[in-house]
Image (cartoon, grey):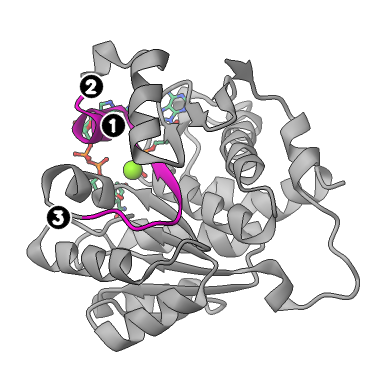
Amino acid sequence: METLTDEILTQTIRVRPQESHKGTYGRVCLIGGNDHFGGAILMATEASVYSGAGLNTTLTDPSNFVSLHSRMPEAMVADFTHQDELTELVSAANTVVVGPGLGTTPQSLSVLQAVFGTVTPKQTLIVDGSAITLLSEKNVKLPQAKLVFTPHQMEWQRLSGIKIADQTDEANEVVRQQLGGIVVLKSHQTKIYTPAGGFLNKAGTPAQATGGMGDTLAGMIGGFTAQFANQTNAVLAAVYAHSAIADELAENQYVVLPTQIIHQLPRYMHEHQS
Ligand SMILES: NC(=O)C1=CN([C@@H]2O[C@H](COP(=O)(O)OP(=O)(O)OC[C@H]3O[C@@H](n4cnc5c(N)ncnc54)[C@H](O)[C@@H]3O)[C@@H](O)[C@H]2O)[C@@H](O)CC1
Ligand SMILES: Nc1ncnc2c1ncn2[C@@H]1O[C@H](COP(=O)(O)OP(=O)(O)O)[C@@H](O)[C@H]1O
Ligand SMILES: [Mg+2]
């Protein structure tokens, strides 16, 4: 297993060409945030916008519209229960992030099924949070897509059937191959299983152990995969940057908030572009 270093950042984060526009930097569609977990999709959206994705659209419960618009006027918003809009907006994206704060109600399940029924093989699909739990517990068919799963250890136990104590690299890789795509197995030292091998993220701090930290990572992976061509490197760079920014902040802070990491992204990416 290869240990990630800051080299993954300069290998991935490109200096922006002069001759470019918002369409050059990808379209991300984020789906989640029920009437209870609105903060999760707000953080995921904010992370995607601050990562530099050119266009961001969030499909969520209408009760989150005002808070999302007031925090993030850069993002477009639509109701995740409107099937026609969902189909149109998910189809227009090159990266789709589903799950932060989606919940596990019958409504959450029907939103997830609508998203999975719309995604096509050319799109990158990041499956996070409640979407992983629903996938584990309900009969949902995964679409053909460039799949990225971002479970924490308990979500991985649900999805893979492997108990946390038994989550060895060998066992995890077997299930990754069955699922297809990339698995970002989040813990105090996140491991990333990819078709090109496994990677260990030694960056990161217990100051990150606070709600919304993974929602933020899902949004960053969304923003990075939408902009940078090599999808595996984009995932690795997002995981590393998320933790490395937290390490910087934790030098002077007892706890690092997800939104504080988000707000450092433009500066941090500027310092690590090549
Ligand atoms: N502000 C918000 O709206 C927030 C919404 N959230 C959403 O809430 C939904 C449920 O997600 P949760 O993860 O809270 O609930 P889950 O029930 O899926 O997982 C949490 C449980 O897993 C256990 N666990 C074991 N190993 C773990 C590890 N390495 N990392 C994290 N937990 C571990 C925890 O102790 C806890 O009992 C998701 O859709 C998520 O996106 C959370 O992200 C919290 C913040
Ligand atoms: N002790 C820790 N050390 C390093 N990173 C941590 C630690 N605790 C949590 N994290 C990171 O925080 C994130 C938590 O993700 P997750 O549990 O999905 O959060 P949420 O769903 O609340 O947004 C992961 O990226 C994980 O690696
Ligand atoms: Mg989570």
**Residue found at x 13% / y 68%:** 107
- What residue is shown at x 63% (from left), y 18% (from top)? 3
> Which residue range is magenta in the image?
141-162
Q: Residue type at mark 3? A: Thr
217 lies left or right of 10: left
Tell me: is circle 2 under 8 Å from ligand 1: no
In the image, 266 versus 100, the foreground residue is: 100
* Viewer can see residue 171: yes
**Residue 19 occupies quadrant:** bottom right
- Residue position for label 2: 162
Foreground mark, 3 or 2?
Answer: 2
Q: Earlier in the sequence, mark 1 or mark 2?
A: 1
User: Is residue 148 a member of the stretch shown in magenta?
Assistant: yes
Q: CA distance from mark 1 to mark 2?
A: 7 Å
Q: Earlier in the sequence, mark 3 or mark 1?
A: 3
Ligand 3: image quarter? top left
Closer to us: 79 or 117: 117
Using the image, determine if residue 246 lies above or below residue 198: below
Contact (CB < 8 A) between labels 3 and 2? no
Classify the position of the N terminus by image quarter: top right
- Residue that sits furthest to the left in the current view: 106
| Amino acid type of the residue that numbered disc 1 sits on in the rendered structure | Trp
24 on left or right of 78 = right
- Whether 61 is among the magenta residues is no
Secondary element at tag 1: helix
Per the rendering, the mark at residue 104 is 3
Residue 196 drawn at (x, y percent): 59, 30
CB under 8 Å between callouts 1 and 2?
A: yes
Density class for disc 3 (Cα within 10 Å; few <14, some 14-19, many ≥20) is many
